[in-house]
Amino acid sequence: MNSKPVTGEYARERQVPRREALGTLAAVAAGAMTVSPRSLFAAETDKPVRLITRADDLGGMRSLNHAVIECVDPGIVRNASVMATTPYTAEAAKTFAAREDICFGLHSVLTSEWDDVRWGPVAPKKHVPSLLQEDGTLHQFHAGLKGVNADEALIELDAQLARIKKLGFKPKYVDSHMGAVTHVPELPEKFAAWCAANDLFDYRDASITKPPGVHGYGSVKNRRKPDDFPDVVLSAIKKCTPGEIYLLNGHPAYNDAETQKLGHDGYADGAVANNLNLERLVFTDPRIIELCESDAVELVRYDEL
């Protein structure tokens, strides 16, 4: 696992030393693993499970900016997707942009999903009117994207890409916040050409298959993830097929006053803050770290594909 000293205003008490995290695991499970990590998988071969580990929404919240530090080291995150439309992107750049142990991408944003925390476009509003609600912010849900003009969406993506580059990020790939690019008429094809023209890896060209058993909890009340979610993910990774590539992405943050403000009718009663904290715990779980550091798992960056 690559390691690089963290600098910037977030390099504080949030960072958990790698040696401490793995030492905790050793103390708890000393002697428990007496077999090769490869034998934990359903199919034991010489090929490792290939796992794209990605933290989404960098710059979206201070809580998330703090959390990503520990999710990279000692954690397993190797890719981070940067939002350009949100309030704390510039602060994130001060801490992260110069780091070479993270592959950065543009988290292209065409929606603003929360009731009480809203954001608008980076491009001048007069150039992207179809992207906006009456209050001047981006559409909240996919339904609003049906009337978006694809060319206006690309104007906005140009502005977002320019902003994170100006802040010092060197993006290698592009993905999509809430998968919005697939919901705008005519945009999916134009998006592919736009990625190629900007020499950016289109996230759709890599696996978007999650480890078996990891899902969105859309059928659960408030989409609230269970407290044992790290256990669910650990078990899911062990069920992956060696040699195949999977995506493990999340929005790691803390359950704090900032994340408690996030929500809408589908994510009520603090479910968002709960889920973000659990996703942080997945990326920093000592058991998952140990498994991903073994020869049974290969952590993958988009710029390695």
Image (cartoon, helix red, strand yellow):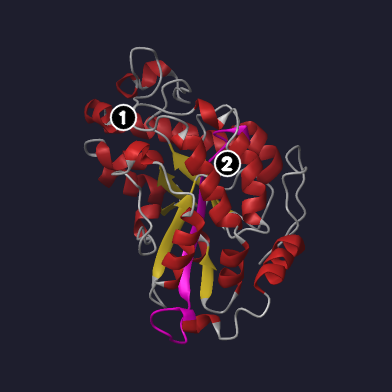
Q: Which residues are magenta?
A: 40-62
Where, by quadrant of the figure, is residue 74 drawn?
bottom right
Circle 1 sits on which residue?
141
Q: Position of residue 298 (x, y in %)?
A: 52, 72
Question: Is disc 2 surrounded by few (<14), some (14 to 19) or many (20+) residues within 10 Å?
Answer: many
Give the answer, above or below, for where 172 lies relative to 271. below
Q: Is residue 245 left or right of residue 23?
A: left
- Tags 1 and 2 in contact by the CB under 8 Å rule? no
The vertical placement of 62 against 132, above or below, is below
Within the image, what quadrant is residue 206 found in?
bottom left
Question: Residue under circle 2?
Answer: 253
> How many labels were placed on the picture?
2
Q: Provide the secondary structure element on which disc 1 rests.
A: loop
Front residue of 195/216: it is: 216
Asked whether residue 42 is drawn in magenta, I would say yes
Tell me the quadrant of the picture where the N terminus can be found: bottom right
In this orientation, does residue 168 appear? no
